[in-house]
Image (cartoon, rainbow, N blue to C red):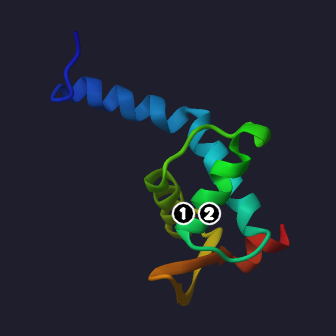
Amino acid sequence: MSHTSDPDTSVAAAFRAARGTKMTAIYEAIVTLLAEGPATPKELHQEYFLRRRSAGWPSADLQDIRRRLTELQHDHHRVVDTSTRRNGERVMALAPEAAAA
């Protein structure tokens, strides 16, 4: 039986999560949604939820969307903060390079 305090279990779980397709699917879903225009994380989550089944996207909560947005911004440079706020949340958009692709 494994425990969350076991370093080997934690490393193995992180490896499985990193190589899984859920993260990639959520990335692509966010990019697809942002191609339609800038949005807040809450707006993206609402639209993601509405389209999830028909698009074949995996389940994702608001925190998943926020995490993937941050990764797309900082690690992949596909998303930018527009420096505007809507309903107290930052409005995100596709980076110019990502929009052109």
Mark 1 and mark 2 residues within 8 Å of each other at the beta carbon: yes
Q: Secondary structure at mark 2?
A: helix
Q: Residue furthest toward the top?
A: 1
Please provide percent x and percent y for residue 81. Answer: 56, 81
Give the residue at x 61% y 58%: 46
At x 50%, y 80%, the residue is 90
Q: Nearer the viewer, mark 1 or mark 2?
A: 2
Identify the residue at image location x=71%, y=61%.
31
Residue underneath mark 2: 44
Q: Kindly identify the amino acid type of the residue bearing the numbered disc 2.
A: Leu
Q: Amino acid at mark 1?
A: Leu
Residue on which disc 1 sits: 69
Q: Mark 1 packing: few (<14 Cα in 10 Å), some, or many (20+)?
A: many
Residue 78, position in %: x, y? 65, 68
Relative image position of residue 93 (x, y in whole percent): 66, 76
For label 2, count other residues whose C-alpha is less than 10 Å away and answer few (under 14), some (14-19) or many (20+). many
